[in-house]
Image: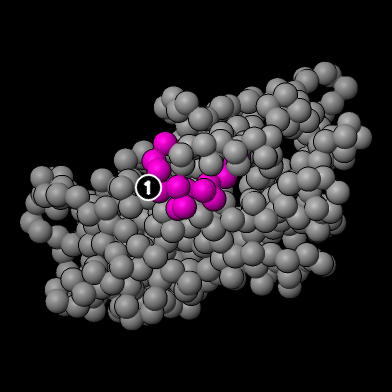
Amino acid sequence: MYNLYRLLGILHSLKNSDKILQQIQIVYMKIGIVCYPTYGGSGVVATELGKALADKGHQVHFIAYKQPARLSHFHENVYFHEVSFSNYPLFAFPPYETALASKLVDVVKFQNLDILHVHYAIPHASAAYLAKKILREQGIEIPVVTTLHGTDITLVGKDVTFSPVVSFSINQSDGVTAVSESLRQETFDYFDINTDIEVIPNFIDLDAFQKLDKDHFKKAIAPQGERIIMHISNFRKVKRIQDVLDVFHRIHQIMPAKLLLVGDGPERKNAEAQCRDLRICHDTRFLGKQDAVGELLAVADLFLLPSQNESFGLVALEAMACEVPVISSNAGGIPEINLQGETGFLSEIGDVENMAKNAIYLLSNEDKLQEFRKNALEQARRFDIEAILPIYESHYERTIEKVKAKSGMTV
């Protein structure tokens, strides 16, 4: 099928004779994407990547236990395959990994996939390995690319319950990518890895995230022209919501300001209690989960991200694409996105005093704030999906060629 799709790429170029030389290298692939279908970062990135690949002409097959959250509209090049599993009473917990492996075998065989791209090491990479072994017994070689996103390495993967499986699955993958240099290094530091890991950063769709004219919305939130501070997360402890509120409290003591908290999770109840204790609830809004995040970011003056750990910090990139400077911790991959003194400021984890000082400095200086807004957008443009997508395509092609050369098959 790989040769067929290479040929289709050539035939497609012949429709535009003046572009034959430029288009002759187009390769259309059948790509299987395995991801968690939730709103989490890995699921969002996997879904947006698949949709962008489909827009370029590749055939994309999503495989998950339910339809991914961002896969809401029909696309002629996108297919979804639901993983179902038995509730046989013998099993205390449904054997999802086994069911996923069986589904992968089925989809690869009957859809003639060229490559599998699994997002998140546990359990997707290990299930892909099992599927790969089963398919090999049937004379089918399927290349597997594993993308590491963060907590599959920094949290789940370090658990002794999973660590040996994580190491094995990464080493058995035909291609491995990580979303930041920080995550790549952490993977080598904590696991016995004997394969290369290519850094392919997360990306931003600049059409979906951009500065919009939402003055009417801004006036509704801040009728007296108050500064609007924003935070978006899943409200887990690692996001340090208490620091967000502490920083805002300090800002609030110096200037009129409003805080918008987007998202929900286990720390929300504690955050609401802290909000009352600090007496800032009248200027704080808990907005819960929101789909139109770009519209909310359009009215923000500053974004807070004081996380304990972030493998990449995609939400910071979304804010920057909307021309919102970022006040953040220096954790994980955040410094690879948020440039100190240019797009925002970095502080040590938990140093709310320094974060507040930097925030007040920017919010008190309109010229400096506008400079940082411009810098934030320029930085976000470096992560435009149009720039990152070809890197993934190249990684797929090299992985396919490597596997087929190794197995003695003709590419």
Q: Please name whichever residue, 76 or 361, is drawn nearer the observer in this view of the structure.
A: 76
Q: Tell me, yes or no, whether the highlighted magenta stretch contains residue 23.
A: yes
Amino acid type assigned to the residue bearing label 1 in the image: Asp
Q: Please name whichever residue, 197 or 235, is drawn nearer the observer in this view of the structure.
A: 197
Q: Please name whichever residue, 59 or 46, is drawn nearer the observer in this view of the structure.
A: 59
Residue at 14% across / 49% down in the picture?
Answer: 213
Image position of 191 with respect to 96: above or below:
below
Identify the residue at the far right of this view: 137
Which corner quadrant holds the N terminus? top right
Image position of 99 with respect to 5: above or below:
above
Q: Position of residue 302 (x, y in %)?
A: 28, 64
Provide the residue span drawn in magenta.
15-29
Image position of 86 with respect to 172: above or below:
above
Pointer 1 residue? 18
Residue at 40% across / 48% down in the picture?
Answer: 19
Residue at 14% across / 60% down in the picture?
Answer: 226
Q: Position of residue 60 (x, y in %)?
A: 57, 35
Q: Position of residue 352 (x, y in %)?
A: 40, 73
When asked about the image quadrant of residue 245, the answer is bottom left
Q: Tell me, yes or no, whether the highlighted magenta stretch contains residue 229.
A: no
Q: Give the SS element for disc 1.
A: helix
| Total tally of numbered discs in the picture | 1
Identify the residue at the far front of this view: 17
Its colouring scheme is one colour
Residue at 65% across / 67% down in the picture?
Answer: 184
* Left or right relative to 271: residue 410: right
Q: Where is residue 347 in the image (x, y as percent from the top left)?
A: 43, 78
> Quick check: can you spot residue 248?
no
> Quick check: can you spot residue 77?
yes
